[in-house]
Amino acid sequence: MDISTLPTSNSGIGFHYYPDDLHYRDVDLNAWLPELIAMRVSWLTLRSKPERGIPEAFIKGILAAGIEPIVHIRPNEIQRLDLNALDLQFTSYAHWGVRFVVVFDRPNARDAWSGDQFGRVDLVERFLDIWLPIVELAQQSGIACVLPPLEQGGTYWDTSFITGVIKGLQRRGKQSLLDELIISCYSFAGLQKHDYGAGGPAVWKESKPYQTPASSQNQLGFRSFEWYAAAVETNLGAHRPILMLAGGARLGEMSPSTGEIVDAAWHASTNLTIAREYLAGNYPDYLLNVNFWLLATKANDPDAQASWFHSDGAAVQAVAELKTYARRRRQTRSEKSNKGVGVSAGGAVKVLQHYLLLPRYEGVASGWHWNFVGDIVRTYQPTCGYSPEEARHARHVTLVGDERGISQSIEEQLIQAGCSVERISSDDPVVAHKEITTAALNLTTHTENGISQ
């Protein structure tokens, strides 16, 4: 896949959504979009099952908000699947705009296989027999060819498994598939620092499969993607894109030396460092994203301790820190692109160019409005949100919806703050698109000419 086609607004930061396939209602979409946007999330791993796909409304709502979905289809075990059912899912996903669908999970782990299947000879070849018809079907629908994520280390050593897959595809004459291959991964930090294993086997030459001297490091940390990239380059002579389904530091990890659970401060510090490093461009270009584990769970879920948002709505320390960092980065970029911008006649510092203010009805965010303005968000990349206070710091503000969602008093307050304000309230999306596009074009022209609105 040509990764240059990713949106220019792509931050590379994302999350693994719930560890189940049950939270795809409109109310879930409306509840989570404001949180995801506040953390500058551009990617979301969505778990699914072979027999039931993710609803169209949820997928389109995520895409309209500028978030790239990664659909992870996880059957209970690695086995032959109903290709007709998968073909229908692939076709639908591609039609809606999904590009990444991953089928199966951790084929190098014993518990991913039933009975004695794992221990039989030629594990990699047997996996390819099952996986190849599926991934070729996905390609026919326009879905990317993605190798499922491996367990770090694993019962069958992960880097050896990747080598086996590549050599197996080469023996089968699947060069066109190899040319488009994307490697998906888990990159959990464990109890290691964020840079544990950095540089891969080129740096840690003493590390071998199943053998890591005390003086060396391996792929059992956040930098697992570098070890996978090295295995791919060794066997193909070039890198392939790497897609992270989940990674980072996990709450609930236990220190083997002290027996204590790692605290929230360590979790926040490690993950914020990872986010900063990615946004600063300090990770390899082949790494498409960093998806943190885990956004949320239902009550009493086994993974509940690791979630960033608890079932009662409370958030862990890392949430506030990531939101603050995302907001500061956005403002810094705006300040750099608006040299000389000071205080407007209304007294508000204009550090943003264009703000798209969306309505809430009875305190609930409207998913319909996200779908309504999705093309504009993707095309012109305004700052989006639900905060009139944040909107005051934009030169131009577009109000979406009528006065039931955004009152006339809010509009007047924004005008008094020196904002150029328009309201898009047409029920006809074509009319609204033309109106908002004209405003965005005018803003762009005025900015290029150095004219403040």
Image (cartoon, rainbow, N blue to C red):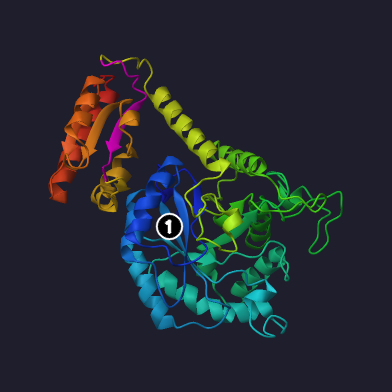
Tell me where residue 237 appears, x and y as whole percent. Answer: 63, 58
Q: Which of 429 and 175 is in front in this view?
A: 429
Q: Which residue is drawn at 43% across and 81% down?
A: 83
Q: Which residues, given as a range, are shown in magenta?
A: 346-361
Tell me where residue 67 appears, x and y as whole percent. Answer: 40, 51
* 341 sits to left or right of 133: left
Q: Nearer the viewer, residue 156 or 238?
A: 156
Tell me where residue 306 appears, x and y as whole percent. Answer: 60, 54
Number of numbered discs visible in the structure rendering: 1
Q: Residue at x 63, y 39 (%)?
A: 269
When the figure is inspected, residue 409 is found, relative to residue 124, above or below; the finding is: above
Q: Label 1, on which residue?
A: 69
Q: Nearer the viewer, residue 60 or 19?
A: 19
The verdict on residue 241 being magenta is no
When the figure is inspected, residue 442 is found, relative to residue 236, above or below; the finding is: above
Determine if residue 41 is in view: yes
Which image quadrant for residue 300?
A: bottom right
Q: Which of 35 and 287 is in front in this view?
A: 35
* 234 sits to left or right of 214: left
* 410 sits to left or right of 382: left
Q: Which residue is drawn at 86% across and 54% down?
A: 213
Determine if residue 239 is in view: no
Number of residues whose C-alpha sits closer than 10 Å to that of mark 1, classed few (under 14), some (14–19) or many (20 or more): many
Which quarter shows the C terminus? top left
Which image quadrant for residue 443?
A: top left
* 265 sits to left or right of 319: right
Tell me where residue 344 appears, x and y as whole percent. Answer: 29, 16
When the figure is inspected, residue 282 is found, relative to residue 77, above or below; the finding is: above
Q: What residue type is labelled 1?
A: Pro
